[in-house]
Image (cartoon, helix red, strand yellow):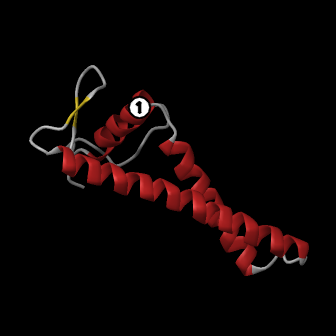
Amino acid sequence: MDRLTRRLPDGAYDPGEHSAEEITAALGQYEDFIESVEAELELIRINLDELKKAAKQRSATYTMLTGSRYMLEEMQKRLAEPAEEVNARLEAMRRLISFDPNDDGIRDADA
């Protein structure tokens, strides 16, 4: 992903050389994404309720929709996280995927 902004040490963002129109367009796409996650989650909940009323909780469709519900709920949770927590998780993931010639490939739970 190519970022339009750069995170500053104080937690603010710098748009760099990008115009207000570019930043506004990116924000609009981000807001559309959030709305689509919310709408899809609502549709899944409606479908799950209908399947439950029809006593089809053991169906493949119900199982698949439940998995989708969990995934979308996790996405919503992450989208609502404070910026500090997002940044900390991102830095931790960057450390995990960075190349280390002495890395044995085993990830310790307490690392």
Q: Is residue 1 above or below residue 49?
A: above
| Residue in the image at 44% along x and 58% along y | 33
User: Which percent across, then down, holds residue 72?
Assistant: 58, 57
Question: How many numbered dots are placed on residues in this image?
Answer: 1
User: Which percent across, then down, holds residue 73?
Assistant: 61, 52
Q: Is residue 49 left or right of residue 104?
A: right
| Residue in the foreground of this view, choosing between 98 and 69 | 69
Q: Is residue 44 above or below residue 21?
A: below
User: Which percent across, then down, holds residue 77?
Assistant: 56, 44
Residue found farthest to the top: 10
Q: Is residue 77 above or below residue 63?
A: above
> Quick one: quadrant of the N terminus?
bottom left
Q: Is residue 67 left or right of residue 3?
A: right
Residue found farthest to the left: 17
Res. 105 visible in picture: yes
Q: Is residue 76 left or right of residue 65?
A: left
Q: Is residue 3 above or below residue 36?
A: above
Res. 3 visible in picture: no
| Residue at mark 1 | 83
> Quick one: quadrant of the C terminus?
top left
| Residue in the foreground of this view, choosing between 43 and 109 | 43
| Residue in the image at 41% along x and 27% along y | 84
| Residue in the image at 67% along x and 70% along y | 65
Q: Residues within 10 Å of mark 1 (few under 14, many from 20)?
A: few
Mark 1: which amino acid? Ala
Quadrant of the image occupied by residue 101: top left
